[in-house]
Amino acid sequence: MKSVVLLKGTSLNWHETGMSISAPDRSSIRATAVSFTDDELVVCLADGRSVLVPLTWFPRLLNASPKARNEWRLIGGGIGIQWEAVDEDISVAALL
């Protein structure tokens, strides 16, 4: 039996002739909503997951007013998020 470490402290076991593992197709990952905490961007995904990333990754959003942060729109059917007022576009797949 083989074991692969997925995240620190976790592992997945499978038999050599058994289960195979493949990464999800990132092109099918789509946002449905966006919100903010004091220091994080929160993106809700169509599959029910939420992705939280530090605002420090996006200085334009970090320095934007709360009003400007909340003026977002989904682009490409949810594959991206745009903030026209602060000139920021983010690919949802890039957040993963």
Image: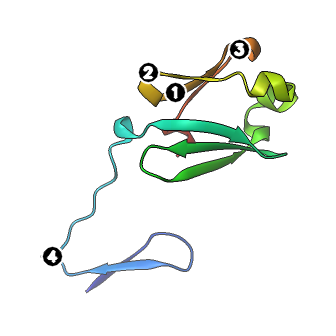
Q: Residue at x 36, y 35 (%)?
A: 27
Q: CA distance from mark 1 to mark 3?
A: 13 Å
Q: CA distance from mark 3 to mark 4?
A: 48 Å
| Closer mark to the observer between disc 2 and disc 3 | 2
Residue 74 x/y as whole percent: 54, 24
What residue occupies the far left of the structure in this picture?
A: 17
Q: CA distance from mark 1 to mark 4?
A: 36 Å
Residue 82 horizontal side relative to residue 6, left or right: right
Q: Considering only vertical position in the picture, is 86 above or below 8?
A: above
Q: Quadrant of the N terminus?
A: bottom left
The kind of residue tagged 1 is Gly
Please name the residue that numbered disc 4 is placed on: 18
Q: Considering only vertical position in the picture, is 29 above or below 84?
A: below
Q: CA distance from mark 1 to mark 2?
A: 6 Å
Marks 1 & 2, CB-CB < 8 Å contact:
yes
The kind of residue tagged 3 is Asp
Marks 1 & 3, CB-CB < 8 Å contact:
no
| Closer mark to the observer between disc 3 and disc 4 | 3
